[in-house]
Amino acid sequence: MIREQKINPENDLGFGPQPVIKNQPLLNKNGTVNVKRKGMSRFNTADTYHTLITMSWTKFWLVVLSGYLFTNLVFACIYVAIGHSSLDGTSGGNGMSHFLDAFFFSAQTISTVGYGHISPQGVVANSVAAFESMLGLLAFALATGLLYGRFSRPTAKIVYSENLLVAPYHGGRRGLMFRLCNIRKNVLIDLEIEVVFSYNELVDGKPLRRFFPLSLERKNVSMLSLNWTVVHPLDQDSPLIDITREDFERGEASFSVLLKAFDDTFSQTVHSRTAYQANEMVWGAKFVPMFQRDEEGRIVLDMSKINTFEALS
Amino acid sequence: MIREQKINPENDLGFGPQPVIKNQPLLNKNGTVNVKRKGMSRFNTADTYHTLITMSWTKFWLVVLSGYLFTNLVFACIYVAIGHSSLDGTSGGNGMSHFLDAFFFSAQTISTVGYGHISPQGVVANSVAAFESMLGLLAFALATGLLYGRFSRPTAKIVYSENLLVAPYHGGRRGLMFRLCNIRKNVLIDLEIEVVFSYNELVDGKPLRRFFPLSLERKNVSMLSLNWTVVHPLDQDSPLIDITREDFERGEASFSVLLKAFDDTFSQTVHSRTAYQANEMVWGAKFVPMFQRDEEGRIVLDMSKINTFEALS
Amino acid sequence: MIREQKINPENDLGFGPQPVIKNQPLLNKNGTVNVKRKGMSRFNTADTYHTLITMSWTKFWLVVLSGYLFTNLVFACIYVAIGHSSLDGTSGGNGMSHFLDAFFFSAQTISTVGYGHISPQGVVANSVAAFESMLGLLAFALATGLLYGRFSRPTAKIVYSENLLVAPYHGGRRGLMFRLCNIRKNVLIDLEIEVVFSYNELVDGKPLRRFFPLSLERKNVSMLSLNWTVVHPLDQDSPLIDITREDFERGEASFSVLLKAFDDTFSQTVHSRTAYQANEMVWGAKFVPMFQRDEEGRIVLDMSKINTFEALS
Amino acid sequence: MIREQKINPENDLGFGPQPVIKNQPLLNKNGTVNVKRKGMSRFNTADTYHTLITMSWTKFWLVVLSGYLFTNLVFACIYVAIGHSSLDGTSGGNGMSHFLDAFFFSAQTISTVGYGHISPQGVVANSVAAFESMLGLLAFALATGLLYGRFSRPTAKIVYSENLLVAPYHGGRRGLMFRLCNIRKNVLIDLEIEVVFSYNELVDGKPLRRFFPLSLERKNVSMLSLNWTVVHPLDQDSPLIDITREDFERGEASFSVLLKAFDDTFSQTVHSRTAYQANEMVWGAKFVPMFQRDEEGRIVLDMSKINTFEALS
């Protein structure tokens, strides 16, 4: 059974008392909220931007490339539709060759490279070409904005240990421990972390989710220079002191981690979130240090060791 | 009659004791301030930018397109004015056909596509063309900045329930309730809300506007994961406990809502405002939940239900 | 004589006890610091950027235009130096006409318009042209960044009344008053203002500057909807209660105004500063209201009245 | 020996009790953290951006130029591979001359200048050219973003005195002093500084690093108008009062300086860090003032004097 404790209403992550069922965490491992949403208006510029900014680079380049091809196909058809006379300097061939001339002319126009060995003739073709070149400039303006937007987004990338250890902690106590570090080059300062424990409790028969902020050995770090091992001491003040492994499982317990930091390189506040489920807890193990010294006495931090721990006999 | 209470002077939204007359709210539904302004210097770069950034996309594209057409018209006239000899490779026709040649040459120049089948001849035409192409680059630089500016603006879009309900609230009390959710994909954290009640009071004959911050069941949410139902309990501590429906109407009462949040996707602080007038209050009704569970037990939030409530018999 | 009072060391605006002499204010009317600086390394990218961002638009366009002309002149000379054969399609004239051909070819290259009626011949000319076109793209990239930088800077423009009034203030007291409003369209919220009074005091013969934060009727406004009249009550708690007009003059007194606000449109924190000197104080006058009502009862704010006051008999 | 004192755990700069050995400071003079890192995934967009943004301008231009040359070389090879017929308008020469034609054509395509005296023939060459011009636009979009990113980074450049002086301080005491100023034009306000003293202490035989926040005569300045001399009074409350010069050396003592300010010109929070080692302390010297008055009585600040001090007999 859990100990009674004043709950800070701010700490329910905005879920209220909704219970977790069928092992559906509230917060996913990657920090996103596990809620499906519907009923929003389909098209939505801000979300389009959001999507283009957050999608993977591979996807992004595919979108750009296919957009470029598609637009050229459309304009090629238009030039073909206008007729042979519309493009001067073409091989004058028919069907496919004519289409290809139109396609490449379109590419030369939209990219504003305009060699000129093919050039538009007549009012219609000229108007289309004039419009296409303007379109090209704007499309390119968009690409510029998107590329910059993708780059300049808060770039802190925090890596967390996969497991949450129940390890011995000085003073013969035990503590809940996980650790994290920043695998990016940018400097993170003024870090602040919050860990919220939540689990299902049966209140007159029906399950309700309850949330408990966990006190930490240390809530802040002024600079993330090495790795940071976050510890919740399992002492008399901890609401978890009496909980058994079975309780954690049964209550679909989870630990939500909310990290806030200031990215000193781009002067932005950045947030990072993750969650540990009961099945990610390891009992009786301790982390292996992540750093050694090199010959000059400099500290060397090995990121790949983030989750390395040793079981305790 | 309203109960006496210490007023926080910060909460008058900067209006001071100006009364509301003829149902002119201080804060519009969309969160803008209902004040007409005059006497500013007409032309004002920052405001031009502001206008171009905040106007609708349709309007924006119209401005860009017409700007492009207009500039080309101007330059076409200049090339025509310089005379036939100024453009080489034209059909050499007169009047309209000459003008069109000039127009399309201008378009090819300003978009820097420069096919070259038409090219400038002589010092004057060359100078104009050189200037126009530079202008084109800068205009395009502007467009880039504007497009990026439009995209990268704080994008949280909070939707509020249209009505303010006077609903039963646990402990047999009643409460004033409205709810909100974010219809955008970006994650909002550290939300803080403030509700200010204002109404006209007769002070020795003349009406003065008075402002009362309302205490809320909950002022903060650490993450906006689902919808958020904001509640002002109508208990003994509420300044509204004794007010009748008629009082609300007579005093041109309004509730100003000020929401502050941190957009975690673009790491910007965003604000949202709205207001409820007396005529938007619904007495004796309660909101219908906005979410169900899907088969996997995942919570599904239906944005379209934001204002769905049921009357209470 | 001034009353003793605890001084908040943070309020000396970073000047320490340096006295003001020969009416050289510490803070200029426009909010800049009145200090000459030398000994900095001359060339300094960040400052170049700073200069280009903060200079007037007229100046900015002149810089861009002259840069464009200058670069073209330089490249024109290069092409001329390489010799006639370097450019194909030129009139083949000598001296001036050759130079002009080179100049316009350069313009067509740097703007990437590249008509092609003139084209580079030979390795040298081609290499120069290839380099120039790359340069053109980068120069233009710079222009884009600068234009966007100029636009997206915090744009709040606070206008202050020119004078600081010593006006009657409720409760039969007097108060020091000035007022301000935002002439831009962007919404300012969470405003906070600080007024620091400073003057020279003779400490054993030599003058020292002393600073006194002034208590205000109101330090914050949650939204700048109308104008804001800032009042320092001249009551028993004011350090100025006993100062005479002569004292203000003699002590080279000045009032520094520091305003902080959040620009809700671009979600940036903006600051504004100004200062009032003793000779800008007006004794026995009061401000005329800046707004009336229109026929619909809407408040109409007239910015042009910002400094309108009436003398009191 | 050092005096016992409550240590604020936030002040260990994220290093914990790791001792400093072989004079390897935790914080480098330039404010970077002295830790080697390994085990990160090699390629990493955010870090690529970080590198391109933070590298020196010379390096940056070299990267851009070589990237441009390299890409053109690659495409030149492709055009050559496709064969003579692929490019129309070339001299038709072989080997080198053919390659050069291809190279310059590529340059004209990627920069979208496209003179057209050389133009692509056939489907293959046209496709490559179409792709190359698109690539050119995107590369350029990247350059734009990078240039703007480089410019718009927080630009405060704080210069610190090279030495930390142990100077006489009013009241016959001594104080630890260093000074700083901003050599950039942008206005810094709301400055806040923190100085942390750290040194190795032997705890039962093995050295541990201990950290002591030092109390300062003044922690904040509302505006950095002149230079700022930061003073830690060596009085009875100072943990350093009893430490000898030898202790500083032996304990590999260092002083970490953390400065936070708001850049009013670009409305960004900026941070600056530096560190002083024991061997940079100067005993019995005092700083020479950095400013005089000019004839109009204006204060003139001479940045070059930042580290000028005079020894005391």
Image: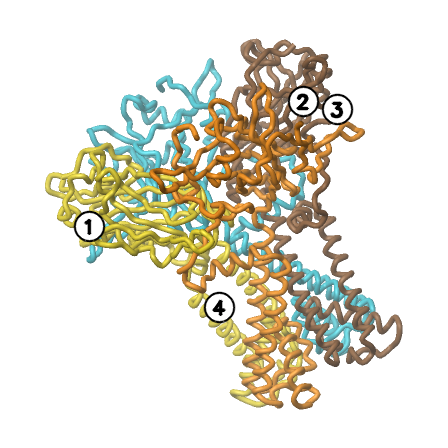
Chain colours: A brown, B orange, C yellow, D cyan
Say above or below: C82 vs C22.
Answer: below
Distance of label 3 from label 2 (alpha carbons): 10 Å
Task: Identify the chain of the residue marked 3, using the numbered disc in the image.
Answer: A
Vertical relation: C246 (above or below) D65: above
Name which residue type carries label 4. Val
- Total numbered labels: 4
| Chain on which label 1 sits | C
Label 2: chain letter? A
**Which of the 4 quarters of the picture holds residue A212?**
top right
Which residue in the structure is indicated by mark 2? A254
Residues at marks 3 and 4, common chain? no
**Quadrant into which the N terminus of chain B falls:** top left
* Marks 3/4: CA–CA distance: 62 Å
Residue that appears at 63% across and 41% down: B186
Q: In the rendered structure, which amino acid carries the disc numbered 1?
A: Trp
Give the CA separation, mark 1 to mark 3: 74 Å
Among the two numbered marks 3 and 2 on one chain, the one whose residue lies closer to the N terminus: 3
In this orientation, which residue lies closer to the viewer: B90 or A20? A20
**Is residue B155 shown to the viewer in this render?**
yes
Check disc 3 and report the residue beneath it.
Answer: A23
SS class, disc 1: strand
Mark 1 or mark 4: which comes first in sequence? 4
Residue at coordinates 46% horizontally, 33% vertically from top-left? Answer: B213
Q: Are marks 1 and 4 on the same chain?
A: yes
Q: Which residue is mark 1?
A: C283
Please state the horizontal and vertical placement of residue B218, each as a whole percent of the image.
54, 27
